[in-house]
Amino acid sequence: MWLLQLPPKLSTPFLNGFTLLSLSSKPTSISTPSPPSFLPPIKAMKSMQGKVVCATNDKTVAVEVVRLAPHPKYKRRVRKKKKYQAHDPDNQFKVGDLVLLQKSRPISKTKTFIALAAPSRGSNNVSIQGDSSGELSIPLESQQEP
């Protein structure tokens, strides 16, 4: 016969007898913003960040993602844009908002992403002698005493 038969002494499903140290332990997950509980995330896909360009449809936003890619002939990095349809169940995003796109199961023919709130870019600013009004307490040149 032309079938490959394993020797009877190997009791593992691997051909070389290699076994993992712990088959029952689960890998630790990286903390990412979790999507709503009604849709399970797909963890093989990275999340993307983009800007909302259209929010007129109900529960759907169009998000434009910009990436840099080398030009095929000139090898210079050029911007490439692509628009994705994303699920927005609460209609909370407006045109111009930054959002994270999390991959999920297909919701419709064109929607396979969920829009999540992106962390704001200026969230880690440190104020020097901070006031509650948000202004710096550095006196102007005209306000300084001689």
Image (tube, rainbow, N blue to C red):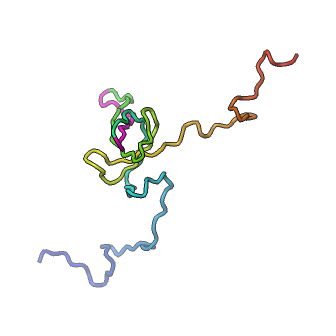
In the rendered image, which quarter contains the C terminus?
top right
> Magenta stretch?
58-73
Instruction: Locate residue 124: give its quadrant.
Output: top right
Which residue is depicted at the point 25% across and 47% down?
109
Residue located 52% across and 42% down the image? 119
Residue 133 placement (x, y as % from top left)? 70, 32
Residue 97 magenta-highlighted: no
Between residues 78 and 32, which one lies in front from this camera angle?
A: 32
Query: How far across and how far down the image is residue 45, in percent?
Result: 37, 51
Relative to 28, say whether 110 is above or below: above
At 43% from the left and 53% from the top, the residue drawn is 35
Which part of the image, by quadrant, shows the N terminus?
Answer: bottom left
**Residue 63 magenta-highlighted:** yes
Q: Residue at x 49, y 56 (%)?
A: 30
- Tell which residue pokes out farthest to the left in this image: 1
The image position of residue 87, as x and y in percent, is: 36, 46
Of 108 and 16, nearer the camera is 108
Residue 122 left/right relative to 90: right
- Magenta-drawn stretch, dominant element (helix, strand or loop): strand
Number of residue marks: 0
Name the outermost residue toward the bottom: 8
Image coordinates for residue 76, horizontal then vertical, percent: 38, 28
Q: Is residue 38 above or below residue 87?
A: below
Location of residue 140 by image quarter: top right
Asked if 113 appears above or below 38 in the picture, the reply is above
